[in-house]
Amino acid sequence: MLLRKSSTHALDWRNDLACWVHLNVVLQLHGLRADLRFQRLLNFASGSGDQQSFADLAVLAGFADQAHMTREARRFANCTPTVLLRSAECTLRMSDLFNTGDPIPR
């Protein structure tokens, strides 16, 4: 556990709590935002009928710039955006094969 057992001062306790919140909340939200940006990139790339530049896709998906998108693509998919988006389009087309259009029974 992160909280120090020997903390007797209120300042120590607050610092420990701030550190715990940062590690368990802030960093988790940061990771979630990165995941969502990556998913938006795949969505925009597959949903656009016309070819868009990587810079345009980066802005649409919420990345700071094209270099940011490239770093995240390498981090999540371990490949460049060119390879990723080519394979993502194929994968997303395959997922449509299983879409029956029937509502989920309750």
Image (cartoon, rainbow, N blue to C red):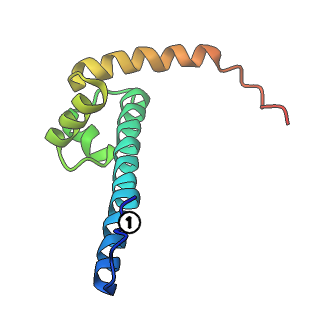
Instruction: Place residue 12 in its image quadrant.
Output: bottom left
Q: Which residue is mark 1?
A: 21
On screen, residue 4 versus residue 67, left or right, reads right
Instruction: Place residue 8 in its image quadrant.
Output: bottom left
Coordinates of residue 70 in the picture (x, y in percent)? 19, 34
Q: Residue at x 34, y 27 (%)?
A: 50
Coordinates of residue 33 in the picture (x, y in percent)? 37, 50
On screen, residue 40 versus residue 105, left or right, reads left
Residue furthest toward the left?
67
Q: Between 21 and 39, which is closer to the camera in this rendering?
A: 21
Q: Crowding at label 1, few (<14), some or many (≥20) Cα neighbours within 10 Å?
A: few
Instruction: Place residue 99 in its image quadrant.
Output: top right
Q: Between 75 and 98, which is closer to the camera in this rendering?
A: 75
Depicted 39 relative to depicted 102: above or below: below
Depicted 67 relative to depicted 89: above or below: below
**Can you say which quadrant of the picture contains the C terminus?**
top right
Coordinates of residue 26 in the picture (x, y in percent)? 35, 60
Label 1 element class: helix
